[in-house]
Amino acid sequence: MITVKPEGGDYYSLTEAVYKTFDTCEDIVVYPGTYDIKQEYRCFFKTTDINNETNLGHDFQYGIRIKNRTVTFLPGSFVECVWYFPTDFSAKFSPIYMGENAKIYGLNLYAEGTEYAIHDDVWRSDIPYVNEYHNCVVIGKNLFAENCIGGGATKFSRFVIDNCYFDNNVKDGVTVRYHNTDYEDGHSDIWINNSYFNGKIAFTYYGTSSVMHAYVNGCEAKAIEIKPETDDSRIKNVILSSWNNKLDGVIYK
């Protein structure tokens, strides 16, 4: 286990801690303090501008890449990233970029001007994995892809969101979204429990023969929405089970 602290830890920069231990996959504990991702990137990578064509190593041009490890944020630790990028998708940066088998506990994140607050989409993988979020607070503002979490299933993936709070500062928008995969014959599932969303939860169908199951219980949201991911998505390969939720709207299918 390694520690991140403003003083006296193994690292004082969250960005540097994750990057330099990327291959060893050691678990990380983040101590009280404020971790400014824009400032950390500029100090560590010695650059002021990044975009999706810049190779920073370990795919860090898309955000802090967390995979095959657990990151625990202690009370009093805050992660912030106010970093405005072009809205024409010439940059696709999100403060947190999830890989496979990533578990996050107690994250308190504020993101402004980025694509998402958290990007949880491995995209091309047929290796089973599980990603988890527990007791997290994620606040977004002016996210140009709107979602606090923008996620996507792979062939065999599971996502767990438990006891979390999300607010993207968009009235009647989609706060958290996960899409299915175009892999053939896949089975993925999403479990969302006891969490708050200021807007909608969306599950979007994509591909043909893979099925994505979504289980939502004990949550508060504007609505739960099932819709196509792209204009040519036709097969409704998302199956929703929903119970004990408080919804301002209805469940759209």
Image (cartoon, rainbow, N blue to C red):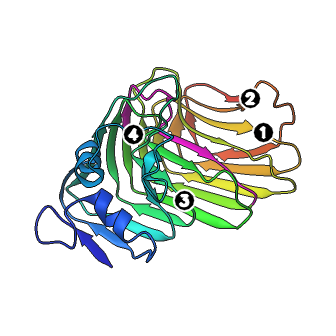
Disc 2 to disc 3, C-alpha distance: 23 Å
Q: Mark 3 points at which residue?
A: 99
Q: Which amino acid does label 2 sit on?
A: Thr
Residue 223 to residue 63: above or below = above
Q: Which amino acid does label 4 sit on?
A: Ile
Q: Give the range drawn in magenta.
A: 139-155
Q: Name the residue under label 1.
A: 206
Decide which of 11, 248 is in the foreground and name it: 11
Q: Mark 4 points at which residue?
A: 50
Q: Name the residue under label 2.
A: 230
Q: Where is residue 63 in the image (x, y as percent from the top left)?
A: 43, 48
Callout 2–callout 1 Cβ contact below 8 Å? yes
Could you tell me which residue is drawn at 35 percent across and 38 percent down? 111
Callout 1–callout 4 Cβ contact below 8 Å? no
Mark carried by residue 94: none
Q: Does the magenta stretch include residue 61?
A: no
Could you tell me which residue is drawn at 36 percent across and 64 percent down? 18
Which quadrant, please, contains the C terminus? top right
Residue 201 to residue 153: above or below = above
Q: Which amino acid does label 1 sit on?
A: Tyr
